[in-house]
């Protein structure tokens, strides 16, 4: 997808080096803050077994980091359940909806109280199987936040879980494709 550049998840060191190279190409200069974010993101991605680490870019924004992974849960998850455990001064907005592919989604936007930056966490629930996809978008500066979160929202909105039964199709109980975008940043 244009604006989303995935990086390889080899070793933490290789991932950090590739991530730094992409950020350097986008910024045109080495930014110590982004270098630190690259190392931290690579370490987190490997520690948590992420399936995706990418840079989200927009001409009117500083680059942001997108990390994603699928997590097995004990039972099929109620799509509203994660939102019951979310509160605090850094949470700006919690939105429930449905992705363009028909999956329930909870979107949490965090804006730090003291300092720059912004974070978006998106939990997409698979109602047919006990698993969720968790996406985290982090902008170290917050500059152009609406632009990068919009790109990430379009990316997340198209998520499709692989069928674990091997049949290649969603079960009859699944929702049909369609619905609304997982994007919440209408302000």
Image (cartoon, helix red, strand yellow):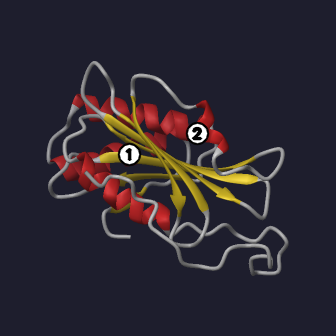
What residue do we see at 27% from left, 47% from top?
Answer: 23
Q: Nearer the viewer, residue 161 or 48?
A: 161
Query: Does residue 178 lie above or below 146 as drawn?
Result: below
Label 2: few (<14), some (14–19) or many (≥20) C-alpha neighbours in 10 Å: some
What residue do we see at 33% from left, 36% from top?
Answer: 118
Nearer-N-terminus badge (1/2):
1
Query: Does residue 71 lie above or below 58 as drawn?
Result: above
Horizontal side of residue 15 vs 140, given as left or right:
right
List x then y, in percent, for residue 85: 61, 31
Mark 1, residue position: 65
Q: Quadrant of residue 33?
A: top left
Q: Which element type, helix, strand or loop, lies under badge 1?
A: strand
Give the Cα separation between the discs numbered 1 and 2: 23 Å
Q: Which element type, helix, strand or loop, lies under badge 2?
A: helix
Label 1: few (<14), some (14–19) or many (≥20) C-alpha neighbours in 10 Å: many
What residue do we see at 38% from left, 45% from top?
Answer: 65
List x then y, in percent, for residue 89: 40, 22
What residue do we see at 67% from left, 42% from top?
Answer: 81
Query: Does residue 157 lie above or below 145 as drawn?
Result: below
Mark 2, residue position: 83
Image quadrant occupied by the N terminus: bottom left
Q: Nearer the viewer, residue 155 or 1?
A: 155
């Amino acid at each position: 997808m244009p604006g989303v550049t995935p990086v390889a998840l080899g070793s933490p060191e290789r991932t950090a080096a590739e991530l730094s190279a992409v950020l350097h190409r986008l910024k045109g200069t080495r930014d110590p803050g982004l270098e630190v974010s690259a190392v931290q993101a690579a370490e987190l991605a490997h520690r948590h077994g992420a399936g995706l680490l990418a840079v989200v870019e927009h001409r009117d924004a500083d680059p942001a980091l997108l990390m994603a992974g699928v997590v097995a849960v004990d039972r099929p998850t109620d799509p509203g359940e994660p939102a019951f455990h979310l509160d605090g001064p850094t949470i700006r907005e919690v939105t429930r909806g449905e992705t363009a592919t028909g999956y329930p989604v909870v979107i949490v936007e965090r804006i730090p109280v003291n300092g720059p930056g912004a974070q978006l966490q998106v939990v997409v629930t698979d109602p047919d199987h006990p698993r969720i996809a968790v996406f985290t978008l982090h902008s170290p500066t917050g500059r152009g936040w609406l632009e990068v979160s919009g790109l990430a929202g379009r990316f997340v909105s198209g998520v499709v879980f692989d069928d674990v039964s091997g049949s290649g199709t969603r079960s009859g109980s699944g929702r049909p494709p369609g619905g609304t975008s997982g994007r919440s940043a209408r302000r």
